[in-house]
Image (tube, helix red, strand yellow):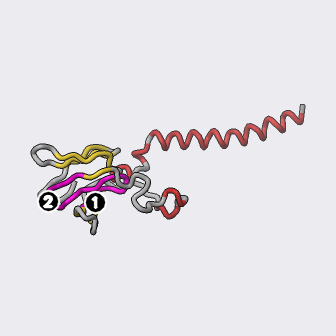
């Protein structure tokens, strides 16, 4: 009987720690807006998460603005480049802090020329006068 008490106590304590960790991670995953502004450097993550040669969906697509200007978008944000891809310039001024706002799922140009960016955190419209989203 005493042995079962000891086993029950320690098994419950170990299992309780795991249940608390699962509950805490579930709360964080279901309320991601609470921690979405926190960025973790990819240098702290394993090698497979590092961006090399535009991997990991860092570029999902592109949108031609006109002439030789292209907007490339993806998990790394929005970048302005030319058709030869010789230089890149960040084009994500105005997005909220955090990776969810910079993870661009779709970039759209309306018939009237208005640019829209669809992110995980919402839909953004580009303001031409202020040059920001």
- Marks 1 and 2, how far apart at CA: 16 Å
Region of the chain picked out in magenta, as a range: 63-80
Q: Check residue 28 in the rendering and tell me which mark sits there, or answer none.
A: none
Within-10-Å neighbours for mark 1: few <14, some 14–19, many 20+: some
The one nearer the camera, 4 or 76, is 76
Within-10-Å neighbours for mark 2: few <14, some 14–19, many 20+: few
Q: What element carries label 1?
A: strand
What secondary structure is the magenta-colored segment mainly?
Answer: strand
Q: Which is more foreground, mark 1 or mark 2?
A: 2
Locate residue 9, reporting x and y percent. 78, 38
Mark 1 or mark 2: name the one nearer the start of the chain: 2
Q: Check residue 79 in the rendering and tell me which mark sits there, or answer none.
A: 1
Provide the residue designation for mark 2.
Answer: 67
Residue 49 among those drawn in magenta: no
Q: In this view, does 126 lie above or below 22?
A: below
Q: In which quarter of the image is the N terminus?
A: top right
Q: What element carries label 2?
A: loop
Q: Which residue is drawn at 15% across and 44% down?
A: 110
Q: Find the residue positioned furthest to the front.
A: 84
The one nearer the camera, 113 or 66, is 66
């Amino acid at each position: 009987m005493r042995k079962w008490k000891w086993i029950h106590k320690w098994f419950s304590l170990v299992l309780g720690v795991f249940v608390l960790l699962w509950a805490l991670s579930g709360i964080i995953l279901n309320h991601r807006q609470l921690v979405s502004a926190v960025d973790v450097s990819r240098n702290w993550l394993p090698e497979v998460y590092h961006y090399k040669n535009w991997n990991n969906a860092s570029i999902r697509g592109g949108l031609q603005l006109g002439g030789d200007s292209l907007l490339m978008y993806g998990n790394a944000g929005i970048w302005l480049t030319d058709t030869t891809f010789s230089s890149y310039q960040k084009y994500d001024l105005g997005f909220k802090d955090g990776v969810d706002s910079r993870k661009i799922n779709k970039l759209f140009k309306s018939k009237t020329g208005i640019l829209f960016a669809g992110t995980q955190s919402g839909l953004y419209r580009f303001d031409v006068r202020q040059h920001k989203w």
